[in-house]
Amino acid sequence: MDGIPKGNPMMTSRGCGFLAAWVCAWALTVAGCATTPYRYGVTPPSGIVTADMLRPGEPQFERGKPQPLIDGIGWLVGIPSKIILWDIRADNHSISEETEAALRRYLELNDLDQVKVRLNQYAPLDEWRRLTRNRAVGWGWRYTFGVFSWLHYTLLPGRIFGGDHYNPYTDTISLYSNIPAVALHEGGHAKDFAGRRWRGTYAVAYLLPFFALYPEALATGDAIGYLRDQQDAEGEREAYHVLYPAYATYVGGNLASHIVKFSWTYYAAVIPGHIVGRWKGSTVPRRAPDGGAEGHRWNGGDEAKNLEPAHLGSVP
């Protein structure tokens, strides 16, 4: 194989494993930093044509109806994700009210009121409607790559195959994991795209080698920076533990696809992701909003109900 020295195959693959681990640890250390000081909200570029993506009276958040058999199959299909992230909540197809409330507050504070959130829901017809209405993405991108993404969503439903993601062509977040940090990470993608002028071009650029590492780092840093600004020490530690190995899969995947050509490099890269994530998580001080020693987790239920528009406008 071009670019790989000949010799003992075991030594060659071992060397590639060390390379993947080193590159992954370096990438996490450099790119996986929290966004500080954290900035709330997005200022859309001038001249962007937008449309009200939510119909009058349509809820921003929707849940799929319980389907024990389908969700049970999905839980089994998601076992690799649970092992990679070392979190049984990954692709468990059961989103708690706490996770929903955490993402709801994030979207409110960042003025992302037209982003649709589907909690373990399969809705291909409504996703097609959103695809055709999303004029913030050029029609050329929507009716090519956007249609491909819709076909993938329709034919390989996340309700079974999992995979939390943000779809820029429909401006939709689909969640299948009950992990607040993952939900905030996907919210970070929505925030990132909301500030882009060429959103379709930016979305298609994900297909370029290693390009995805940039927006993934932005979304990870935004989620961690948000939790730090909210003084949610427990949530910040959890974000390091989960989002760093998740980011490592992108490093390993790109290395395996474009450089070392060993498929297991994808999995080998996760190890330094967990190591660096645990180390970064251990550096988060226990703190409370009043400066005390204990961490604070936001209580989404009551606080979300009492959140007033005036408060949203006062966030720095």
Image (spheres, helix red, strand yellow):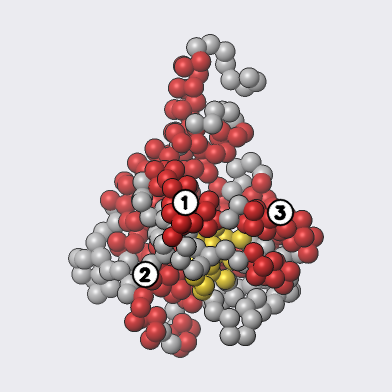
Q: Quadrant of residue 1?
A: top right
User: Which residue is found at the position 53% from the left and 11% from the top?
Assistant: 7
In the image, residue 126 sits, relative to residue 224, either above or below, namely below
Which residue is denoted by mark 3 in the rendering?
148
In the image, residue 15 sits, relative to residue 285, either above or below, namely above
3 or 2: tag closer to the N-terminus:
2
Does any portion of residue 30 appear in the rendered image? no
Name the residue furthest front. 69
Return the x and y of residue 259 as percentages of the image width and height: 59, 30
> Which amino acid, mark 2?
Glu
Asked if labels 2 and 1 touch by Cβ distance under 8 angstroms, the answer is: no
Which residue is denoted by mark 2 in the rendering?
98
Which residue is denoted by mark 1 in the rendering?
73
Quadrant in which the C terminus appears: bottom left
User: Which residue is found at the position 33% from the left and 72% from the top?
Assistant: 298
Nearest to the eye among marks 3 and 1: give it.
1
Give the secondary structure at mark 1: helix
3 or 1: tag closer to the N-terminus:
1
Q: Residues within 10 Å of mark 1 (few under 14, many from 20)?
A: some
Separation of residues labelled 3 and 2 (CA atoms): 33 Å
Return the x and y of residue 76 as percentages of the image width and height: 43, 48
